[in-house]
Amino acid sequence: MVTPPLQLYMARRKAYHRFAMRGGRWALLTLCAVLLCSQTRAPSVPVSVLQRGVPVDGELAAGGTAAYRIAAAAGDYLQVVVEQIDGGVTVTLASPAGAKLQEARSFNSPYFALAAIASVSGDYSVEVHYDSGRPALFRVAADEMHPAGAQDEVRMAAWKWYYEGNAFLAQNPTMVNRPPAPLVQGIELHQKALAD
């Protein structure tokens, strides 16, 4: 004999209510909480605070990431300097909301910088990542932080073009004797910023 759908629905509803009345609801919620907490999560990277003018030395194994934060007020120019002592690292500067502002990898120089003008007040993040090879040694520092001026906008553009040119050269090694326009433009903007 087939149970009509309405009777089947009512029987299931009664069974659920009996279960819920006996505290089953709390048991179910506890079970869900335990399952959610037991899921494997990626280990979080400890975050260090960068202070203006105070360099921090670091070492990363292959696949490692070091995270830093720097507090900035809206309208501040901030520049983070990275010196690669050994190994090639990639550095990312992000807004308090997590939006990537600038990313750089130095292909042929041990020294490079990332710069931004803070659009909002908050903690800006700096991540140093190393992909492969022997452990990478580096030094990172919040080099400059002050209210932004016109010269700082030129400096930001110069760094942007410089890194685009470097990335182009890394992908096209035969062009080393003929630097690409972004690299030349970045160098010209750096010279202009220094002259002002």
Image (tube, rainbow, N blue to C red):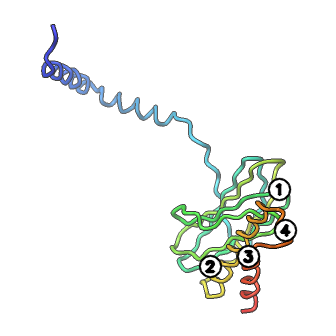
Image quarter where the N terminus lies is top left
- Name the residue located 13 percent from the left edge and 22 percent from the top edge: 6
Q: Quadrant of residue 167?
A: bottom right
> How many residues crowd mark 3 within 10 Å: few (<14), some (14–19), many (20+)?
some
- Name the residue located 72 percent from the left edge and 83 percent from the top edge: 189
Residue 176 location, x and y as percent? 84, 68
Q: Which residue is mark 3?
A: 181
Q: Nearer the viewer, mark 4 or mark 2?
A: 4
Which label's residue is closer to the chain start, 3 or 2? 2
For the residue labelled by badge 2, is the local secondary structure a helix, a strand or a loop?
strand
Contact flag, marks 4 and 3 (Cβ < 8 Å) = no
Which label's residue is closer to the chain start, 1 or 4? 1
Which residue type carries mark 3? Ala
- Observer-nearest residue: 38 or 126? 126
Q: Which residue is mark 1?
A: 87
For the residue labelled by badge 4, is the local secondary structure a helix, a strand or a loop?
loop
Which label's residue is closer to the chain start, 4 or 3? 4
- In the displayed structure image, the side of residue 122 where residue 164 appears, left or right: right
- In the displayed structure image, the side of residue 105 where residue 173 appears, left or right: right
Which label's residue is closer to the chain start, 4 or 2? 2
Q: Is residue 195 above or below residue 10?
A: below
Q: Which residue is mark 4?
A: 176
Q: Which residue is mark 2?
A: 77
Which residue type carries mark 2? Tyr
